[in-house]
Image (cartoon, rainbow, N blue to C red):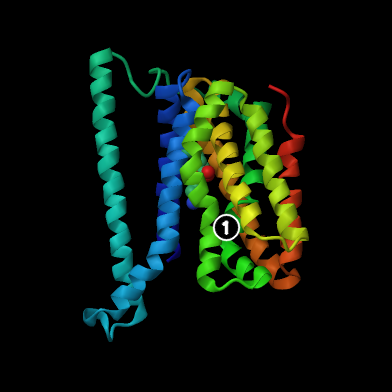
């Protein structure tokens, strides 16, 4: 299982790096934030479908006559085969993309996704010494550790703190992603219109901070902070990722996004473990208080644009 998850991580995150780099190469100076919003929206539709569909798929396979007496690992295996088809669909889309890129290159007599230059060791050194890149990595990791691990443990949180039935807790927990799927492209469009990415990054961070404060210190309906968090997350993601392209030259973008995602994932791996241990040993109040403090890092590390 660990090997499978390792390969899955390499595939998924490399795909995300390539996606970001292509998006910048094709849409920089045009509607880049909206394109990131659209990517985000589709990714979150995928996450929501995955969160809500896998259990019913597993249950219906287990109940089918063909698998009536099958051990659970076999039922799980068949469910994962279904998931494999979505990966094949993704591969087909990537091949389509490669075709369009090749065609654009032929027609425009240029490399469509790159400037043709490749990164040199000197560029790499300049990139690694760039304070702006590390600030963006800091914002990224400090923000994302308050959202992804929160959604990861959200189901049990809503059940325990708000005494919600399992199904209602599931809906509440998916709301962050459902809202992000719905509003990210619109938010991206608005960010393109205003052009003030850093302002939007700060707004997303502060709104999320407010949501964690409501979760931690009140018993008011959890739907309000959850809805605000969905919007705030969309605002942050649609404004933060395109920011890299404003100061990193095109031939170094892939490396820059790779570094950003490595830092993000290192933080997520550590904080997911810490979240579990904080819940088990200290309860949800301490965990949410921790989430409350983490976004202060992005707020304090931002400069006016
Ligand atoms: N490509 C659109 C911008 C990136 C959005 C960002 N992506 C990530 O954080 C990646 N590391 C993939 C994460 C997958 C989560 N299970 C996002 O907000 O999803």
Residue 179 visible here: yes
Percent across and percent down for residue 65 are 22, 82
Percent across and percent down for residue 114 are 39, 22
Examine the rendered structure and indicate whether residue 219 appears above or below residue 88.
Answer: below
Residue 75: name its quadrant.
bottom left
Residue 244: name its quadrant.
top right
Residue 14 visible here: no
Q: Which of 4 and 289 is in front in this view?
A: 289
Query: Residue at position x 55%, y 43% from top?
Result: 262
Percent across and percent down for residue 200 are 63, 32
Examine the rendered structure and indicate whether residue 6 appears above or below residue 132.
Answer: below
Q: Which of 32 and 137 is in front in this view?
A: 32
Examine the rendered structure and indicate whether residue 250 appears above or below residue 261.
Answer: above
Mark 1 lies on residue: 151
Residue 208 located left or right of residue 114: right
Q: Which of 259 and 60 is in front in this view?
A: 60
**Which residue extends farthest top?**
109
Percent across and percent down for residue 17 are 45, 37
Query: Residue at position x 33%, y 21% from top?
Result: 112
């Amino acid at each position: 299982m660990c090997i499978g998850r390792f390969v899955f991580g390499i595939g998924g995150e490399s795909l995300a790096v390539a996606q970001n780099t292509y998006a910048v190469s094709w849409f920089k100076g045009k509607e880049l934030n909206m394109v990131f919003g659209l990517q985000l929206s589709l990714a979150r539709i995928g996450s929501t479908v995955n969160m809500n569909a896998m259990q019913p798929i597993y249950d219906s396979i287990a109940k089918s006559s063909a698998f009536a007496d099958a051990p659970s690992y076999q039922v799980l295996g068949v469910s994962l085969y279904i998931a494999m088809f979505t990966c094949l669909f993704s591969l087909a889309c990537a091949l389509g993309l490669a075709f369009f890129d090749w065609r654009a290159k032929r027609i425009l007599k240029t490399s469509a996704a790159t400037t043709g230059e490749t990164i040199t060791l000197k560029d790499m050194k300049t990139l690694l010494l760039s304070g702006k890149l590390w600030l963006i990595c800091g914002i990224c990791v400090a923000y994302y550790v308050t959202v992804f691990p929160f959604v990861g443990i959200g189901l049990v949180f809503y059940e325990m703190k708000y005494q919600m039935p399992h199904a209602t807790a599931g809906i509440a927990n998916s709301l962050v992603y459902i809202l992000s799927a719905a509003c990210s492209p619109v938010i991206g469009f608005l960010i393109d219109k205003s052009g003030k990415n850093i302002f939007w990054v700060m707004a997303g961070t502060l709104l999320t901070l407010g949501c964690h404060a409501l979760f931690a210190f009140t018993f008011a309906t959890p739907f309000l902070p959850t809805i605000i968090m969905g919007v705030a997350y969309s605002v942050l993601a649609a404004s933060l990722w395109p920011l890299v392209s404003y100061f990193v030259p095109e031939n170094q973008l892939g490396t820059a996004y790779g570094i950003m995602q490595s830092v993000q994932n290192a933080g997520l791996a550590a904080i997911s473990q810490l979240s579990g241990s904080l819940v088990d040993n200290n309860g949800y109040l301490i965990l949410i208080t921790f989430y409350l403090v983490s976004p202060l890092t992005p707020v304090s590390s931002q400069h006016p644009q």
